[in-house]
Image (cartoon, grey):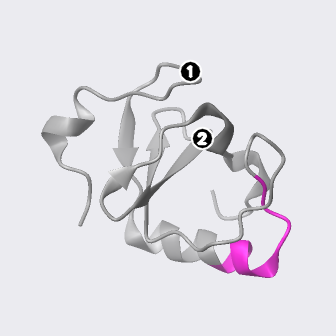
Amino acid sequence: MPVADNLLEIIMCPRTKQNLQNLSSEKVGEINKEIEAGGIKYYDGSLVDQKLDEALITADQKVIYRVDEEIPILMIDKGIPTEQFKSI
């Protein structure tokens, strides 16, 4: 289930302070293919080793945050830079 609009009005990217929006399930699927292929990393340099169920993306489309069990994981080091993806 996507993050509710009323929550999106009050949360923001901890790195850039930009608004966040739900990433479409189509884009999440494309990103998951690249995660499965390997080499995708979080800002802290650790490997993204789990597919995304849901995700949020910054307004400028440069940072993705995973959503696990309907909880946005908004930790600076666990943002995923989109420059790594061919599909964004």
Residue 20 drawn above or below residue 80: above
Give the residue drawn at x 26%, y 60%: 2
**Label total for image:** 2
Q: Residue furthest left?
A: 6
Pointer 1 residue: 16
Position in image of residue 1 (x %, y %):
23, 67
Report the side of 29 relative to 87 (left or right). Answer: left
Pointer 2 residue: 63
Report the side of 4 relative to 19 (left or right). Answer: left
Quarter where residue 85 is shown: bottom right
Give the residue drawn at x 71%, y 72%: 35
Give the residue drawn at x 61%, y 69%: 31
Label 1 – label 2 distance at C-alpha: 9 Å
Residue 18 drawn above or below residue 51: above
Circle 1 — which element? Answer: loop
Image quarter of the C terminus: bottom right
Position in image of residue 82 (x %, y %):
68, 48
Position in image of residue 69 (x %, y %):
34, 65
Q: State the extent of the magenta-drawn residues as a range.
A: 33-41
Q: Is residue 73 magenta?
A: no
Amino acid at circle 1: Thr
Between 81 and 41, the one nearer to me in the picture: 41
Give the residue drawn at x 25%, y 52%: 3
Q: Residue furthest top?
A: 17
Report the side of 31 relative to 22 (left or right). Answer: right
